Image (tube, rainbow, N blue to C red):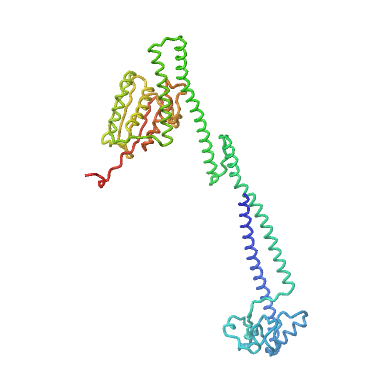
């Protein structure tokens, strides 16, 4: 704020100084022009009266000097005595007769000198009874002011300085006000940032304008909201991990204690239960490990060029018996002219397996699931479509978040760990692809993977 006010003050002072100098010059120039015009008018009146009285210019210069002395005070247009040397305060105006000969000298001219034609042309002709009897010339713009005129200009200077000072004070006051208005959003952002750094992620600042500061405030609010959401998701994820770990561990610990104390007998069924709970733990740990490696960009992919329909057939063969047991039809549809893709087959099978497993879980008996491939401008599209319950629109933006469940009442045993779709997204993006979802309640859900096709090998690199 201090720098902004200082810059505004310096700009105001510089502007006011330039304005004062310009106005001072204009006023002085105008005043001097007025003085010259008034003196010239008086001079013309005097010499015209002299000529009308005498009929010639003889002795006009001595008459002017004597007339000035009779009026009292120093003669403003004092000249060189006739025939005397050039020097001393000169007359302001030169008077030449019709032939161009100087009769009243001034700066640079002596009595009897010849005035150049160019100067005569710029001069002011004098006429008496319709006859040109002489020419008045102003050879110099040097103004000899009397004390009263000097005092007037001095008062004008002080008035300009006072006006400039008042203007600077007003400009400084307006600058302070403007600086506070401009920096207010910045101060609010600074205070909110400090509170966020202290752990309060609920900070929002008012958006007061639509300019750059308003855009900055809006982006800050979005960042704050995203941080709060991420923090809430982190806490929820921690709670979900703890819950998902606690349930199988509690079952395992209970069985082991009962077996140790002889309360329960070791039977194949109980070992199967313990093995199932252990597998849940292993899957959860493996899923978390996969996501952590994806976040770090450390997923190891064994890329191979494969036909998409081969992957779909492999997944369909794996899950067909599960689907048939639930009364669900599972089929594969292959589009025409679908190019091969360069993927890690095991990773993509895992992706498709997660999607098919979800589809089976949410599709009622009598429904169907279709695995479909098709060529697209951006590469190859693989879709997993079901005729199940569908997903409400408000859940679609968060469907790929970790531990997100459309139905919060579902547990790991009944609804999965909540990491499946997050893993799908991470693995697809690791292949430089993307995944999208379209769904409507009661109409089913379609997940679409878009994978790039491998770049063609240049002919020059083909080994012959």
Asked whether 354 or 249 is in front, the reply is 249
Return the x and y of residue 123 as percentages of the image width and height: 61, 81
The image shows residue 439, relative to residue 10, as above or below, that is above
Q: Is residue 196 left or right of residue 318?
A: right
Q: Residue furthest front?
A: 260
Q: Is residue 237 left or right of residue 104?
A: left
Instruction: Name which residue lies at 35% across and 29% down.
Output: 350
Please identify the quadrant where the C terminus is shown.
Answer: top left
Asked whether 460 or 140 is in front, the reply is 460
Q: Indicate the quadrant where residue 368 lies.
A: top left
Q: Indicate the quadrant where residue 278 lies.
A: top left
Q: Give the total of numbered labels.
A: 0
Instruction: Name which residue lies at 26% across and 34% down.
Output: 336
The image shows residue 151, relative to residue 177, as above or below, that is below
Asked whether 128 or 323 is in front, the reply is 323
Q: Residue furthest left?
A: 464
Q: Indicate the quadrant where residue 130 lies.
A: bottom right
Return the x and y of residue 75 as percentages of the image width and height: 74, 80
Return the x and y of residue 150 as percentages of the image width and height: 72, 71
Asked whether 101 or 268 is in front, the reply is 268
The image shows residue 213, relative to residue 293, as above or below, that is below
Return the x and y of residue 293 as percentages of the image width and height: 42, 33
């Amino acid at each position: 704020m201090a720098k902004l006010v200082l810059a505004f003050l310096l700009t105001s002072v510089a502007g006011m100084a330039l304005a004062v100098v310009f106005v001072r010059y204009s006023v002085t120039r105008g005043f001097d022009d007025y003085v010259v015009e008034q003196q010239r008018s008086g001079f013309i009146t005097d010499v015209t009266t002299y000529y009308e009285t005498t009929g010639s210019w003889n002795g006009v210069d001595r008459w002017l000097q004597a007339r000035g002395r009779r009026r009292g005070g120093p003669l403003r247009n004092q000249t060189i005595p006739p025939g005397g040397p050039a020097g001393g305060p000169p007359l302001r105006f030169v008077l030449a007769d019709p032939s161009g000969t100087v009769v009243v000298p001034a700066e640079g001219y002596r009595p009897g000198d010849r005035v150049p034609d160019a100067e005569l042309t710029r001069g002011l002709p004098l006429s008496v009874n319709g006859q040109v009897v002489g020419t008045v010339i102003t050879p110099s713009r040097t103004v000899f002011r009397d004390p009263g005129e000097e005092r007037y200009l001095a008062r004008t200077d002080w008035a300009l300085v006072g006006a400039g000072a008042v203007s600077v004070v007003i400009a400084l006051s307006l600058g302070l006000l403007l600086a506070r208005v401009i920096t207010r959003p910045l101060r609010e952002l600074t205070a909110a940032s400090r509170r966020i750094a202290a752990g309060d992620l609920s900070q929002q600042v008012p958006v007061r304008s639509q300019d750059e500061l308003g855009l900055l405030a809006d982006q800050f609010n979005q960042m704050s909201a995203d941080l709060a959401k991420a923090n809430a998701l982190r806490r929820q994820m921690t709670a979900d991990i703890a819950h998902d770990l606690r349930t199988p561990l509690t079952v395992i610990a209970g069985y082991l204690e009962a077996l140790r104390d002889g309360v329960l007998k070791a039977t194949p069924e109980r070992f199967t239960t313990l093995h199932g709970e252990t597998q849940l733990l292993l899957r959860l740990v493996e899923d978390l490990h996969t996501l952590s490696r994806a976040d770090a960009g450390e997923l190891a992919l064994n890329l191979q060029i494969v036909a998409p329909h081969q992957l779909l057939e492999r997944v369909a063969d794996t899950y067909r018996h599960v689907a048939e047991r639930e009364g669900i039809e599972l089929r594969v549809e292959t589009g025409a002219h679908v190019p091969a893709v360069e993927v890690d087959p095991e990773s993509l099978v895992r992706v498709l397996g997660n999607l098919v497993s979800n589809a089976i879980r949410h599709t009622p008996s009598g429904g169907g699931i279709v695995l479909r491939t098709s060529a697209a401008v951006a590469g190859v599209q693989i879709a997993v479509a079901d005729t199940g319950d569908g997903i409400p629109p408000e859940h679609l933006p968060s469907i790929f978040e970790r531990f997100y469940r459309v139905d919060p009442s579902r547990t790991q045993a009944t609804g999965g760990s909540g990491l499946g779709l997050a893993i799908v997204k991470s693995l697809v993006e690791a292949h430089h692809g993307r995944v999208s979802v379209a769904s409507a309640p009661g109409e089913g859900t379609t997940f679409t993977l878009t994978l790039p096709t491998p770049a063609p090998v240049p002919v020059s690199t083909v080994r012959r």
